[in-house]
Image: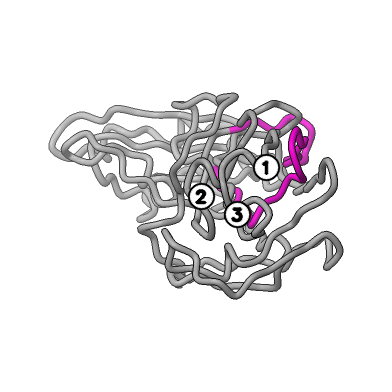
């Protein structure tokens, strides 16, 4: 919502307290999340202790992100965070538009048909075979640029070794870089998961130039990727970007319908 009348905002239903804390952020439409404020509330009726007009004095015209937007980042009664992913972009590398079984929509590859390859073989380790049956490959290296606001993002990279010339370990190795920082050295997909099998890497990165860059550098054979997705940082201000990615996933277990 946009702050128009901070006195009326104090009575807004958007400020229902879910647990014993409220997290809200103040910013502008172009640069949201400028100020992060986290309050611990006390008493039987904690909303009475939240002096919203005083806190938001001078913030008229700015956008407010209240606990209704961010309650997935508040602790549950057992102290376990329950984040819900917020998708920024998803691409089916080397392929066309694709919707995963959980409803997550991947866009067609913006780099076009050149340097792409696909197979009809079944892919183990996934129920979304089509995402892994196509790939972007390029001699020596390729680059994806996605325009985003500066900040910290969670990134999911998907791979599968679908070319018969590299179906065993030691036939293909390449580096994966994000924002020109090495996040995985000498990735050998066949060595990690075998042939025609899904591999997903996840990690956290910081963008400071308005564009999230995914790039590669081959050391043996050509680099490749099956797809990627970019997600809003799940727990703002509580985690820092890393320079290494791990096997895992972000989107599994959630429905985007």
Give the camera-side residue of 161 and 54: 161
Q: Secondary structure at mark 2?
A: strand
* Mark earlier in primary sequence (2, 1): 1
- Residue 51 place in picture, x, y as percent: 37, 33
* Residue 3 appearing in the image: no
* 99 to 141, vertically: above or below: below
For the residues bearing labels 3 and 1, Cβ distance under 8 angstroms: yes
**Pointer 1 residue:** 172
Left-right relation of 31 to 47: right
Q: Nearer the viewer, mark 3 or mark 2?
A: 3
Mark 3 or 2 closer to N-term? 3
Q: Would residue 54 be visible to someone looking at this image?
A: yes
The secondary element bearing badge 3 is classed as loop
Q: Give x and y (percent) for residue 257.
A: 45, 73
The span picked out in magenta is 205-232
Between circles 2 and 1, the one closer to the viewer is 1
Nearer to us in this view, 59 or 172: 172
Mark 1 neighbour density, 10 Å: few (under 14) some (14–19) many (20 or more): many
Q: Residue 228: within the magenta? A: yes
User: Quarter of the image holding residue 212?
Assistant: top right
Most frequent secondary structure within the magenta stretch: strand
In the displayed structure, does residue 66 sit left or right of residue 48?
A: right
Q: Which residue is mark 2?
A: 199
Answer whether residue 131 is magenta in the image.
no
- Vertical position of residue 167 compared to residue 131: above or below: above
* Cβ–Cβ under 8 Å for marks 2 and 1: no
């Amino acid at each position: 919502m946009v702050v128009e009348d901070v006195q009326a905002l104090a009575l807004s239903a958007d400020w229902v307290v879910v647990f014993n804390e409220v997290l809200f952020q103040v910013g502008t439409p172009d640069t949201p999340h400028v100020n992060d404020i986290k309050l611990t509330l006390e008493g039987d009726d904690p909303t009475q202790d939240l002096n919203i007009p005083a806190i938001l004095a001078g913030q008229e015209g700015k956008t407010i992100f209240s606990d209704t937007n961010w309650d997935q980042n508040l602790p549950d009664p057992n102290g376990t965070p329950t984040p819900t992913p917020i998708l920024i972009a998803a691409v089916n590398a080397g392929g066309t538009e694709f919707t995963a079984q959980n409803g997550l929509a991947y866009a067609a590859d913006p780099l076009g048909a050149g340097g792409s390859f696909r197979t009809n073989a079944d892919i183990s380790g996934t129920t979304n075979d089509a995402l892994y049956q196509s790939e972007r490959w390029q001699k020596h290296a390729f680059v994806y640029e996605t325009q985003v606001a500066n900040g910290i993002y969670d990134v999911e990279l998907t791979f599968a070794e679908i070319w018969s010339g590299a179906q065993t370990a030691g036939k293909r190795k390449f580096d994966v870089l994000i924002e020109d920082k090495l996040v995985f050295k000498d990735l050998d997909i066949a060595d990690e998961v075998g042939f025609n099998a899904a591999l997903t890497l996840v990690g956290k990165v910081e963008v400071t130039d308005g564009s999230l860059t995914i790039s590669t550098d081959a050391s043996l054979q050509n680099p490749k990727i099956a797809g990627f997705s970019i997600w809003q940082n799940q727990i703002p201000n509580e985690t820092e970007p890393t320079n290494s990615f791990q096997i895992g996933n972000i989107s599994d277990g959630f429905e985007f319908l």
